[in-house]
């Protein structure tokens, strides 16, 4: 089931460097939230705090809370590996495991989690995940071919299938279409709209049209200057953000006046 995320007073550091300051935002379940803003304002950094990937960088840390359905992901005793299992991630460049087949790619997360799975169950997961990622019809006859034999757009859908195979509650997407052609981009955007029935989705995008097309809510981040922390400036329904934002900087960014 999709979960809600409530972020409160979050500061995000790389060592001593405060990269993103004082973020508070609520992310609704079964919705798509877009993070937009100029380069370096901390969108990807913030995204990675939502599944505890940020702390993989040596010296990186946060203070504040990120609660999923009321449970602080940074609370004592919370296992970051379990967090990453329930909050899936799709990256900018499609990154299937190159030596694995299409089927092995989809099942990789389950196998990495050391879950034993019968052949029949594996077949069910495979089909459910590939159907969920709108890829089944294109690959069902060549599941044993390498993942790298697919087109870029298909590879990205394979990565989405791999992410949803472990039944996450939240899906984070960091510029998932930036390496794709326009047709593959539309396929992923359609898929995002379908997936939001079952998942809470957060997407970082530089593409304003994409944010307007796929998201229910949009969060605008900005940075006052190099070496300064990024900040969340404004978050609202996407319709409001794109028509009557409260802040002038939001309007300037959305209308292409900077960034
Ligand atoms: N691994 C890292 N170590 C140290 N500083 C980092 C690291 N990754 C990012 N930063 C810094 O954190 C700040 C935010 O970077 P981030 O990549 O999150 O921004 P962004 O808004 O996603 O940018 P872009 O749109 O260009 O991808 C920047 O000042 C960046 O230099």
Image (cartoon, helix red, strand yellow):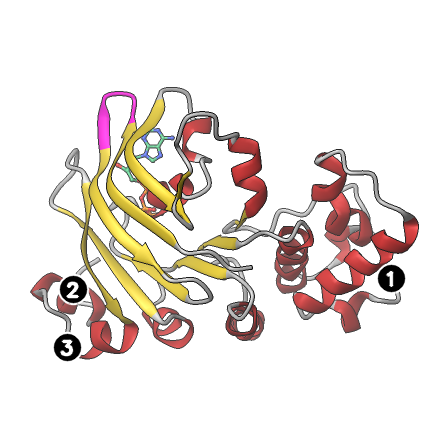
As drawn, the residue found furthest toward the right would be 119
Query: Is 217 on the left-hand or right-hand side of 164?
Result: left
As drawn, the residue found furthest toward the left would be 248
Q: Where the N terminus falls, by quadrant?
A: bottom right
Asked if the beta carbon under badge 3 is closer than 8 A to the nearest atom of ligand 1, the reply is no
Q: Which mark is residue 11?
A: none
Which class describes the residues within 10 Å of circle 2: few (<14), some (14-19), or many (20+)?
many
- Which residue is at a point 48% across and 54% down the rendered structure image? 173
Q: Which residue is mark 3?
A: 244
**110, above or below 184, in the image:** above
Q: Is there any visible trace of residue 192 in the rendered image?
A: yes
- SS type, badge 1: loop
- Tell me if residue 16 is in the magenta stretch: yes
Q: Position of residue 71 (x, y in %)?
A: 41, 42
Query: Is 254 on the left-hand or right-hand side of 69?
Result: left
Q: Which mark is residue 250?
A: 2
Q: Where the C terminus falls, by quadrant?
A: bottom left
Name which of mark 2 and mark 3 comes first in the sequence: 3
Q: Which mark is residue 142?
A: 1
């Amino acid at each position: 089931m999709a979960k809600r995320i409530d972020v409160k007073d979050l500061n995000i550091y790389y060592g001593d460097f405060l990269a993103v300051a004082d973020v508070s935002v609520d992310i609704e379940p079964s919705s798509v939230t877009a993070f937009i803003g100029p380069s370096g304002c901390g969108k990807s950094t913030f995204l990675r705090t939502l599944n505890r990937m940020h702390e993989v960088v040596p010296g990186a840390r946060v203070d504040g809370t990120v609660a999923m359905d009321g449970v602080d992901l940074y609370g004592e005793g919370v296992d970051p590996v379990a967090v990453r299992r329930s909050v899936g991630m799709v990256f900018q460049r499609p990154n299937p495991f190159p030596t694995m087949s299409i089927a092995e790619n989809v099942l990789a997360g389950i196998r990495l989690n050391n879950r034993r799975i019968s052949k029949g169950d594996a077949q069910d997961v495979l089909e459910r995940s590939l159907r969920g990622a709108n890829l089944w019809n294109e690959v069902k006859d060549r599941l044993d071919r390498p993942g790298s034999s697919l087109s870029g757009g298909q590879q990205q859908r394979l990565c989405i299938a791999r992410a949803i195979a472990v039944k996450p509650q939240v899906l984070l997407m960091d510029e998932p279409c930036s390496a794709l052609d326009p047709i593959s981009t539309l396929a992923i955007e359609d898929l995002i709209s379908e997936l939001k029935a079952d998942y809470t989705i957060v997407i970082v995008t530089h593409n304003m049209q994409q944010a307007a097309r796929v998201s229910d809510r949009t969060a605008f981040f900005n940075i006052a200057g190099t070496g300064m922390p990024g900040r969340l400036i404004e978050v609202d329904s996407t319709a409001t953000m794109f028509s009557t934002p409260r802040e002038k900087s939001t309007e300037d960014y959305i209308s292409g006046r900077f960034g």
